[in-house]
């Protein structure tokens, strides 16, 4: 099977290991990965900030970059949600490829939960807002984590609560955003986990900053990085 990888802005600029891990994981499962180099932003930031025209321009650019792709995989629930649910609003008539968030692709398309990973650590999982509420990925990420050799998965208290990032919300409402992030990190620490896992680099960026500022011992990690570990 051949798929195209949409890496997202944050993974490209700040978390390159997420992209590398995604490719390593998919290739280990026998998937041929294509990377259209013309790809840029999906327009989510512009859409969330009230600029649908600018968002539409980027959606059309995405569609052009992936015009030869039948299927696109991205390690981001928020970007997948933007492209699946908002692209028709801001770029009507634009032909879009089928876009899957990573855990959706692994379970729904490849039909696997055991990806051959090994990660001997205690992990708790934060279900990000867009992946849960917009995409409805449900328990797919935790089903994958439960099959990782050596991994001890424990429940995150108040897991359904937002981490406070929310794109430009974190800038416009910094105090509220920070307080929500502190609550999330406190809950992660109380769980007793070594790692706080999520499937969006944006939320992990926010939570990593909060944890480092508070000198919290818990580390953040993307789902793809765990699933690619061996």
Image (tube, rainbow, N blue to C red):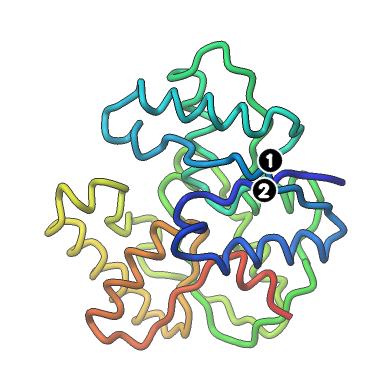
Crowd around label 2: few <14 · some 14–19 · many ≥20 (10 Å): many
Residue 117 left/right relative to 142: right
Quadrant where the C terminus sits is bottom right
Return the x and y of residue 77 as percentages of the image width and height.
Answer: 52, 47
Circle 2/circle 1 CB separation < 8 Å = yes
Q: Residue at 45%, 56% (x, y): give it.
A: 10
Can you identify the residue that label 1 sits on? 72
Return the x and y of residue 73 as percentages of the image width and height.
Answer: 67, 46
Front residue of this view, candidates 55 and 187: 55
Q: Secondary structure at mark 2?
A: strand
202 vs 82: above or below: below
Chain-order first, disc 2 or disc 1: 2
Return the x and y of residue 14 as percentages of the image width and height.
Answer: 44, 64
Q: Residue at 54%, 29% (x, y): give it.
A: 61
Looking at the image, which residue sits at the far front? 38
Looking at the image, which residue sits at the far left? 175
Can you identify the residue that label 2 sits on? 5
Crowd around label 1: few <14 · some 14–19 · many ≥20 (10 Å): many
Residue 136 in which image quadrant: top right
Spatial CA distance of label 2 from label 1 is 6 Å
Q: Residue at 54%, 65% (x, y): give it.
A: 16
Q: Secondary structure at mark 1?
A: strand
144 vs 154: above or below: above
Q: Residue at 26%, 86% (x, y): give it.
A: 215
């Amino acid at each position: 099977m051949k798929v195209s990888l949409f890496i997202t802005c944050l993974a490209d600029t700040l978390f390159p290991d997420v992209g590398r891990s995604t490719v390593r994981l998919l290739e280990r499962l026998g998937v041929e990965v294509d990377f259209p180099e013309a790809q840029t932003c999906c327009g989510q930031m512009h859409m969330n900030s009230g600029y649908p025209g600018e968002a539409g321009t980027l959606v059309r650019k995405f569609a052009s970059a992936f015009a030869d792709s039948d299927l696109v995989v991205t390690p981001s629930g928020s970007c997948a949600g933007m492209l699946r649910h908002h692209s028709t609003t801001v770029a009507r008539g634009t032909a879009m490829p089928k876009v899957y968030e990573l855990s959706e692709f692994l379970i729904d398309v490849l039909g696997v939960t055991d990806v051959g990973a090994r990660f001997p650590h205690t992990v708790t999982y934060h279900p990000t807002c867009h992946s849960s509420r917009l995409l409805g990925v449900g328990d797919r990420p935790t089903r994958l984590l439960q099959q990782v050799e050596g991994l001890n998965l424990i429940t995150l208290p108040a897991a359904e609560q937002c981490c406070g990032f929310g794109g430009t919300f974190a800038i416009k409402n910094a105090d509220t955003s920070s307080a929500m992030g502190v609550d999330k990190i406190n809950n992660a620490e109380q769980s007793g986990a070594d790692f706080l896992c999520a499937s969006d680099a944006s939320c992990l960026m926010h939570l990593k900053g909060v944890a480092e500022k508070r000198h919290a011992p818990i580390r953040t990690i993307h789902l793809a990085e765990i699933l690619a570990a061996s």
